Image: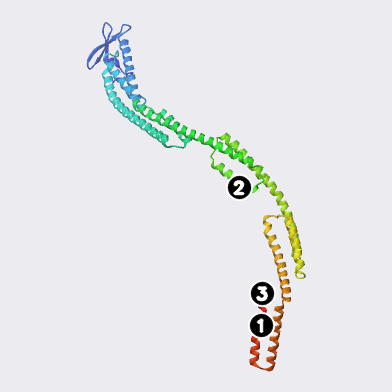
């Protein structure tokens, strides 16, 4: 086909009265009238209109090939041009333009079908994505207890939802109803949870106020062990009570800790003073032990016993010592007590034996038996020696038994 710059005037003529004609395969038809100049100028004028028509067709082809054009819009333009050809006021190869438009119409139809299929696929993918988002929202609404994370995810789902286009109105409306219902259900369940949590925190606040009041009442106590144990139990109760509202929790905790610190600080001061006193008592008792260990036990047991009694009296007057020193100090004192008691017992036994007539008599019998044994041995009488030895052994055994039990 002839294009811009070609001899398109060959497809037309101007008659004597100025009527302009174009020739096509279907015959010749009038396209206009020219009175303003020569016939050549008239044909050139209508040829330029033909060039404009060809330019419009080429633009449609180029845009369709590049993918910049919408196939449906291009199709409408092709139909419009096809319908205008029988009456177009232009001189040129209109049959070539018609063929070119026919070929373009086939390409446009194929492109339009591809676009239609792509749009259908995109609509289905968009609908499927929204179904996935709805299913996720419904799962969150039914099961999630991670309220912050779940709430953020619900908002993200809504933001993504707004970016998804192309779903048909009916499907989109049904899916939106499901999402909105899931969002409302989640909001109600979360609200119910936090309402219950608020009630629990109010209960925890009331209970912790009682614990604080009791702790503050114990802050000045001097019942060290009993109060310390009770404060430890109050701490365990505090931890088990759960959290109160944030502001109340912080204020109550400050009061609770202050009461504990007051008690334990006072106890520490008292214990420090007492430890200093106990350390001085330890030094005094250590000095008494040195004195006790120096008692002369061998010389006079009764005097040693009297000295130990005096040490006992002063020992009790001194008072308590540090716990870790009590055992070693008591053991050293008991060792002295044991030695004095053994000495007194031995002295008593000696005095008891010396004043016992029965023992004196038995000692005399042993002495007589010893003399008889000597006489028998001197006489060389073996029978009398054996009898004397047996008699002496028996009397000695009786004497030893009597001395042990007296």
Compared with residue 373, is residue 121 higher up or lower down, i.e. above or below? Answer: above
The residue closer to the viewer here, 307 or 295, is 307
Report which residue position mark 2 lands on: 229
Tell me the number on the disc at residue 256: none
Query: Which residue matches tag 3?
Result: 405
Chain-order first, disc 2 or disc 3: 2
**398 sits to left or right of 88:** right
Which residue position is annotated with label 1? Answer: 395
Q: Is residue 38 left or right of residue 234?
A: left
**Pointer 2: residues within 10 angstroms few (<14), some, or many (20+)?**
few
Q: Position of residue 249 (x, y in %)?
A: 57, 36
SS under mark 3: helix
Residue 166 in view (yes/no): no
Residue 40 screen position, x and y as percent: 31, 11
Question: In x, y percent, where is residue 166?
Answer: 36, 27
Q: SS class of the residue under badge 1? A: helix
Which residue is nearer to you in this view: 263 or 88? 263
Q: Quadrant of residue 44?
A: top left
- Marks 2 and 3: which is nearer the front? 3
Residue placed at 72% from the left, 49% from the top? 273
Question: Is residue 285 placed above or below 241 in the rendered structure?
Answer: below
Instruction: Give the residue drawn at x 68%, y 94%.
Output: 379
Q: Tell whether label 3 touches label 2 (CB within 8 Å).
A: no
């Amino acid at each position: 086909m002839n294009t811009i710059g070609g001899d398109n005037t060959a497809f037309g003529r101007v008659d004597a009265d100025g009527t302009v004609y174009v020739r096509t395969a279907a015959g010749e038809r009038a396209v206009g009238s020219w009175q303003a100049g020569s016939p050549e100028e008239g044909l050139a004028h209508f040829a330029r209109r033909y060039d404009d028509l060809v330019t419009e067709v080429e633009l449609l082809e180029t845009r369709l090939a590049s993918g910049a054009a919408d196939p449906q819009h291009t199709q409408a333009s092709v139909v419009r041009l096809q319908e205008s050809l029988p009456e177009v006021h232009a001189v040129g190869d209109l049959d070539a333009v018609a063929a070119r438009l026919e070929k373009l119409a086939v390409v446009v139809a194929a492109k339009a079908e591809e676009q239609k299929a792509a749009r259908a696929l995109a609509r289905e993918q968009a609908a499927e994505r929204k179904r996935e988002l709805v299913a996720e929202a419904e799962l969150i609404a039914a099961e999630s207890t991670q309220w912050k994370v779940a709430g953020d995810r619900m908002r993200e789902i809504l933001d993504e939802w707004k970016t998804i286009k192309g779903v048909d109105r009916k499907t989109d409306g049904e899916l939106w109803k499901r999402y909105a219902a899931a969002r409302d259900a989640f909001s109600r369940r979360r609200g119910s949870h936090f309402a219950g949590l608020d009630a629990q925190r109010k209960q925890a606040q009331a209970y912790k106020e009682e614990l604080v009041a009791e702790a503050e009442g114990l802050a000045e106590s001097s019942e060290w062990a009993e109060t310390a144990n009770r404060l430890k139990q109050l701490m365990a109760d505090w931890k088990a009570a759960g959290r109160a509202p944030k502001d109340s929790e912080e204020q109550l905790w400050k009061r609770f800790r202050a009461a504990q610190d007051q008690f334990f600080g006072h106890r520490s001061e008292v214990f420090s003073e007492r430890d200093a006193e106990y350390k001085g008592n330890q030094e005094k008792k250590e000095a008494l032990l040195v004195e006790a260990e120096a008692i002369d036990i061998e010389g006079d047991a009764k005097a040693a016993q009297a000295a130990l009694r005096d040490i006992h009296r002063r020992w009790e007057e001194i008072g308590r010592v540090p716990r870790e020193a009590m055992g070693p100090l008591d053991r050293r004192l008991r060792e002295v007590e044991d030695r004095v008691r053994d000495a007194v017992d031995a002295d008593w036994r000696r005095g008891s034996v010396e004043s016992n007539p029965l023992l004196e008599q038995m000692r005399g019998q042993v002495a007589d038996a010893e003399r008889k044994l000597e006489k028998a041995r001197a006489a060389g009488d073996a029978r009398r020696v054996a009898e004397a030895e047996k008699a002496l052994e028996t009397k000695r055994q009786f004497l030893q038994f009597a001395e042990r039990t007296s």
